[in-house]
Amino acid sequence: MKNPKTEICDAILARKRFVLTSHAKPDGDSIGSQLAMAYALEVLGKEVRLVNADPAPAHYMEFPGVSRIEITREVIERPGPHDAEALIVMESSDLQRTGVAGLAGRFTINIDHHQGNTVFGALNWIDESAAACGEMVFDLIEALGVPLTIEIATHVYLAILTDTGSFHYSNITPKTFDICRRLTEAGVNPAAMARRVFDQNSFGKLKLIGALLAEMDLLDGGRLAAMYLNDDILNATGTTYNDTEGLINLPLTAREIRAVVFFKLGADGDIHISMRSKYDVDVRAVAARHGGGGHKNAAGFKVKGPLGAVRDGILKEVTDAIALGVQLRA
Ligand code: 5GP
Ligand code: MN
């Protein structure tokens, strides 16, 4: 039997038109993986359409090709009878996670590195050991024989730099650095990339950071931090939801902290809950109980509000996860 990567290569080479998508509220890995793949397909002479439910964070707009991504909640066109088309979905546990309707019923290639992927494609390549989906895309591009153009290398680097939390997280392997070495040889400038990705705060975002930290709760003897985002804070600081990317990591920089829960209140009454943790504290298990997903140290889910009704229960679950994680480590 062929391995999934080889099967995906064959399927790509046999097709002409591609729709590429990733999860709603895209992050650096989804944008980087999607665009690296798009540039590689174009080197092979393929037609590529990029579709996402939400725009990329504003400071990614200057990365090559980001402005080409169509922002839509529904794809209307159906594939033709000869089905020369394939849908490539990256970073998504299921099709719903894309936030884009109308994608079902196509020949689907599913590429992901999260636990809990529902294996919804005709071809599925799930590698939980990959530090970023971008690592898998790098492998695929290499297997397709496409040379590393600067656009491809830049996007793979963006994916890895962001999904490893700038080389902070436990999913980094020698392979991660091997890939980054190749990307650097292809012309990527790591210092410039770090500045472009991380040193992009507006003054509003600095104020947002101040406001969120001022309102943060410290719980469980300083091992757990809870942060709360609502429209009032965004309005007061002149920021938008996109400005919150990465801010969940701030409390983690405190020595004692083992986990952070970030409650983001949407206008629709939904609460998106992001969680981060250190060491053996498994926040994915908490997310999975609520229909969400992610990784052991970075996970999320959505619940219906109001905040007061769900807050204590969720914080209790994370407190228990901290206790369990500390036990495992002892
Ligand atoms: P973030 O907190 O940055 O939104 O997400 C952290 C991790 O959890 C990412 O790997 C992301 O894919 C995953 N994640 C966040 N929210 C959800 C969700 O609602 N469903 C699933 N399946 N995964 C999520
Ligand atoms: Mn990822």
Image: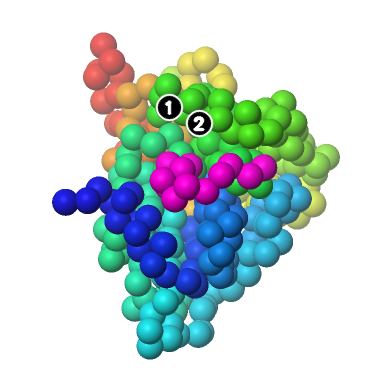
Q: Residue at x 68, y 57 (%)?
A: 65
Indicate yes or no whether the magenta region holds residue 140: yes
The chosen color scheme is rainbow
Indicate yes or no whether the magenta region holds residue 317: no
- What residue type is disc 1 on? Lys
Tag of residue 113: none
Looking at the picture, how far across and down is residue 204, in whole percent? 80, 44
Q: Residue at x 44, y 50 (%)?
A: 144
Q: Residue at x 71, y 61 (%)?
A: 67
Element marked by disc 1: helix
Looking at the picture, how far across and down is residue 206, in whole percent? 76, 36
The answer to whether residue 76 of the structure is visible from this angle is yes
The answer to whether residue 34 of the structure is visible from this angle is no
Measured along the vertical axis of the image, is residue 167 above or below residue 234? above
Is residue 243 or residue 115 the one in the foreground?
A: 115
Residue segment shown in magenta: 137-150
Sort mark 1 into few (<14), some (14-19) or many (20+) by Cα contacts within 10 Å.
few
Sort mark 2 into few (<14), some (14-19) or many (20+) by Cα contacts within 10 Å.
some
Answer left or right for 85 relative to 285: right
- What residue type is disc 2 on? Ile
Answer left or right for 253 relative to 308: right
Q: Residue at x 76, y 50 (%)?
A: 62
- Within the image, what quadrant is residue 129 found in? top left
Which residue is label 1 attached to?
175
Measured along the vertical axis of the image, is residue 262 above or below residue 256? below
Ligand 2 has an atom within 8 Å of the beta carbon of the residue at disc 1? no
Which residue is label 2 attached to?
179
Answer left or right for 305 relative to 118: right
